[in-house]
Image (cartoon, helix red, strand yellow):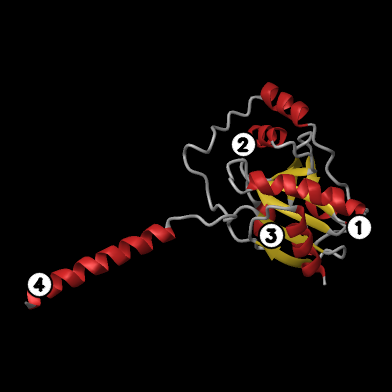
Amino acid sequence: MSTRWTIVVVAVVAVLVGAFVTELGTDPVGSVASGPSSSERQPNTEDPGQLTEARRVAALPPCPVGDGDSGPAALEGVSALCAADGQPVDVARALAGQTVVLNLWAYWCGPCADELPALVEYQQQVGQEVLVVTVHQDPNQEAALVRLAEWDVRLPTLQDGDRKIAAALKVPNVMPATVVLRADGTVAEILPRAFVSADEIAEAVESALR
């Protein structure tokens, strides 16, 4: 009798454990991505001609130049490339004197496909009150430009394949993630989550700046 009950108990526990593992393996809506699968990631060929063409098609706006003062202290000495033209950018100086929504993403990030267009809409809503800048965190510049063109996203974009900006700001290693910077260069809040609408972004930014 005891052996029979032991078998029943083991079977029930196995079913419960299986259900729990299945639940953990299901990504919630709006979840963040920590890294690409091999099928998502594309080889980084860096063909100059293709990169130039990708920049032309993406038609990104110029990167910001700041107000001439020093910018966020945490970003002092950090440089990146402007995705629009490939020129080096002093990140702290470029973001100086402005309230900035800094969005960190990668071309293989699924939630980014919804969030970046929402950021475009948010930028249109707030105008010059807030500057939205995206930071591409994978070495493959061409893939990023192709994605931005596909998603019809035209925002100032920094290319930072070494993730120096994220490291300087101590952003968790997930994407997308958003950093809200006050005009004085201090970090208002780090938001390691995905947004799906301009209204969601506006609410989060307003809350961070209070």
Residue 10 rendering spot, x and y as whole percentages? 20, 69
Q: Quadrant of the N terminus?
A: bottom left
Nearer the camera: disc 2 or disc 3: 2
Q: Secondary structure at mark 3?
A: helix
**To which residue does mark 3 refer?**
168
Q: Is residue 23 above or below residue 7?
A: above
Q: Which residue appears at 79% of the width and 39% of the height? A: 154
Whether residue 77 is visible here, answered yes or no, is no
Which of label 1 and label 2 is nearer to you? 2
Query: What secondary structure is marked by label 2?
Result: loop
Amino acid at pointer 1: Asp
| 10 Å crowding of disc 4: few (<14), some (14-19), many (20+) | few
Relative image position of residue 196 (x, y in whole percent): 68, 52
How far is disc 1 from disc 4 in space, using C-alphas?
A: 77 Å
Are circles 1 and 4 on residues that touch, CB within 8 Å? Answer: no
Q: Which residue is mark 1?
A: 69
